[in-house]
Image: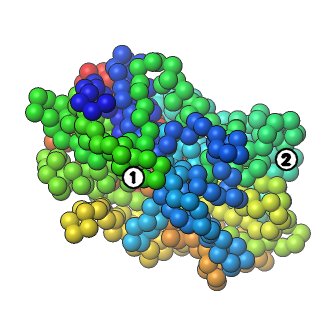
Amino acid sequence: DSGAHVPALVIGTGYGGSVAALRLAQAGVDVHMIEMGMAWDTPGPDGKIFANTTSPDSRSYWLRTRTKQPLSNFLGFPIDKNITRNTGILDAEEFSGITVYQGRGVGGGSLVNGGMAVTPKRENFGAVLPSVDADEMYGIYYPRANAGLGAGTIDPAWFDTAACYQYARVGRKQAERAGFPFVFVPTVYDWDYMRQEEAGTVPRSALAGEILYGNNYGKKSLQKTYLDRIRATGRVAISPLHKVTSVAPAAGGGYTVVIDQIDTGGVTTATKTVTADRVFFAAGSVGTSKLLVKLKATGALPGLNNEIGKGWGDNGNVMCGRANHLWDPTGSLQASIPTGGIDNWAAGGAFAEVAPLPTGIETYASFYLSITKNPNRAEFSWNAATGTVDLNWQTAWKQPSIDAAKTIFDRINQKEGTIYRTDLFGTYKIWGDHLTYHPLGGALLNRATDNYGRLHGYVGLYVIDGSLIPGNTSVNPFVTITALAERNIEKIIATDL
Ligand code: FDA
């Protein structure tokens, strides 16, 4: 309610926000979480909470009248379609040189992501978070995060026989024939549930192509892990469809937080002001960066330092498809949860996940999302003329990512006598170089904040999400975001409360 006072306010309900809220509540602190997206706890007219990837509807996109599918074309034809504008689950946020996909709702990115729960190789960690003690991370916080998220690896024997991983077995065979290691990676999918899906004894979810717009059954999103434990503490209130617009020092101490309540059309229906002793920015790399850049530039938090908005990267994301020969079908039934990747990080700067293309028909296509060592970093800045925050990323900055991915796929194509697909991102376009799923940075650890996420210039303000990480994690990022949040909140609870 407007005028309320809360000990701790958390902006956002993704990985960073959920870790912060759970650990604060367990330490006896009352917490209020503010989330701009919906709760995602009520079934729609079809009896399901989430829409299927193959049939997007008003639940699928954040305030759009037309879908913006990451794979925009099939056989060269555009596949986007009109939908009713609504506070849907997937935000395709467009900056001048890149579209940044993000989850919206209670659970943040965990609602829409592929569930790949990957810990970086220890030898790469120094480049991921240079100021963080690797022994502590690999001894304590990565294990804590993986346990809290429920990460687990597929049974390799089942992988070898399951029809729904035919596409991944083709990916493994071709990787190995070209001399690259194929590695299984853990996921947060319930593998027992997937076996039952294949056996036909439970409703299908991963095997029905559910992923981008939410997963109705087997995926352990944050709703089923951290947020479930948060509810059990009885100390955390969550306000969905509420968006934080301002944080500024309050006259009597603490911070004044201004919050817009919105309806499902995105229209503000009320504006509330609360006071919080401590505020945790966990709005995601883009959300937190946009807020901090705006608040510094417009005078609400002028004492933030000049690192705010800097060091943003796309985790080197680039997509591509390959056309296989007719003797290498990838299967009409494809599990939507990727389970392995091709590791050429050390030699070529690329880690490629073998991704599904769950169209329901045989496509003879192999599809990949590569994470690459892209050195380019962008900066958020305040645009006073438009009253918005810009990001200066340029599409051409993806070239190092394409070059890195080619170290894998040129060689596979050469070995197999195959070619790239040119029909998935336009007509005669090979590379999906217009987007990222993995925004990172904008309020870097040990730069915009101290080495535990305390914002410089303001006691009681913290950053605790992907914006702390300098642009690349060498693998998929949410385990690292979760582990870093576990590390930081432990220190903050021990020393600041
Ligand atoms: P996160 O984005 O999760 O949460 C931020 C929350 O804050 C959101 O719910 C947002 O709505 C809310 N918010 C923002 N601004 C606000 C404001 N002003 N007021 C109130 N609320 C606000 N990663 C991985 O490791 N493995 C994978 O397989 C995948 N796959 C994948 C697929 C797709 C399609 C996407 C889009 C992303 C992935 N990811 C992924 C990435 C992963 O989901 C992402 O890195 C994390 O969700 C980021 O966690 P954070 O806690 O930083 O923010």
Residue ID at (47%, 65%):
99
Query: Which residue is at the far bottom?
Result: 428
- Does label 1 or label 2 sit earlier along the sequence? 2
Instruction: Give percent across and percent down for residue 20.
Output: 39, 31
Instruction: Mark 1: give few (<14), some (14-19) or many (20+) Cα within 10 Å.
Output: few
Q: Residue furthest front?
A: 269
**Residue 406, visible in the rendered structure:** no
Residue 167, can we see it?
yes
Task: Tell me residue 470's x, y (percent).
Answer: 37, 53
Outermost residue on the left side: it is 251
Residue denoted by label 2: 162
Q: On the rendered image, what quadrant is the C terminus found in? A: top left
Say whether residue 231 is left or right of residue 1: right
Q: Is residue 86 above or below residue 490?
A: below
User: SS of the residue at dot 1?
Assistant: loop
The residue nearer to you, when weighing 89 against 148, is: 89
Residue 456: % across, % down: 19, 42
Figure quadrant of the N terminus:
top left
Image height check: is 241 above or below 224? below
Splitting the image into 4 quarters, where does residue 189 fall?
top right
Residue shown at 70% from the left, 38% from the top: 218
- C-alpha span from label 1 to label 2: 46 Å
Please determine whether, in this image, residue 316 is positioned above or below residue 128. below
Q: Which mark is residue 267?
A: 1
Q: Amino acid at mark 2?
A: Ala
Name the residue rendered at 82%, 64% in the picture: 361
Q: Which amino acid type corresponds to the residue marked 1 in the rendered image?
A: Val
Quarter of the figure with residue 275: top left
